[in-house]
Image (spheres, rainbow, N blue to C red):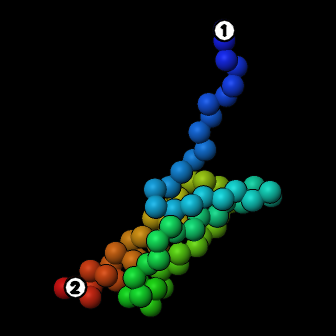
Amino acid sequence: MHDDTSTTTAPAIPGWRLIISDTGRFWAIRNRAFPRTALRAGAEPTVDADTFEEVREAVAEQEEKARTAVEGVSS
């Protein structure tokens, strides 16, 4: 017997929950809170964009901002 069900996988960003609105806008929400130092440095735990590629870039920017802030404190 042949199963015709689709096995399409949704895009994912590790450590972030991805939501696609009914208008097609992409939202990413971090699964775990950023450290306070990162938040004070301006890291945003929620980002949005028009495409998956753009939201992935926005996530990378926030992760880098957080990493830089935390490393600055521990140096």
The C terminus, quarter of image = bottom left
Q: Which mark is residue 37?
A: none
From the viewer's perspective, is residue 73 above or below residue 8? below
Helix, strand or loop under label 2: helix
Q: Quadrant of the N terminus?
A: top right
Q: Where 32 falls versus 16 (above or below)?
A: below
In the image, residue 2 lies at what x, y percent? 66, 12
Q: Secondary structure at mark 1?
A: loop
The residue lying at 65 percent from left, 55 percent from top is 51
| Amino acid type, mark 2 | Ser
Residue that protrudes farthest toward the top in the picture: 1
Q: Which residue is mark 2?
A: 74
Indicate the amino acid at tag 1.
Answer: Met
Q: CA distance from mark 1 to mark 2?
A: 59 Å
Q: Looking at this view, is 20 or 65 the one in front?
A: 20
In percent of width and height, residue 44 lies at 53, 78
Which residue does the image show at 59% across and 64% down from the upper left?
28
**Place of residue 14 in the rendered image (x, y in percent of width and height, measured from the top left):** 46, 56
Which residue is under mark 1? 1
Residue 34 visible? The answer is yes
Q: Is residue 50 left or right of residue 69?
A: right
From the top left corner, tell me how far across and down residue 50 is, in percent. 68, 60
Q: Residues within 10 Å of mark 2 (few under 14, many from 20)?
A: few
Residue nearer the viewer, 62 or 32: 32
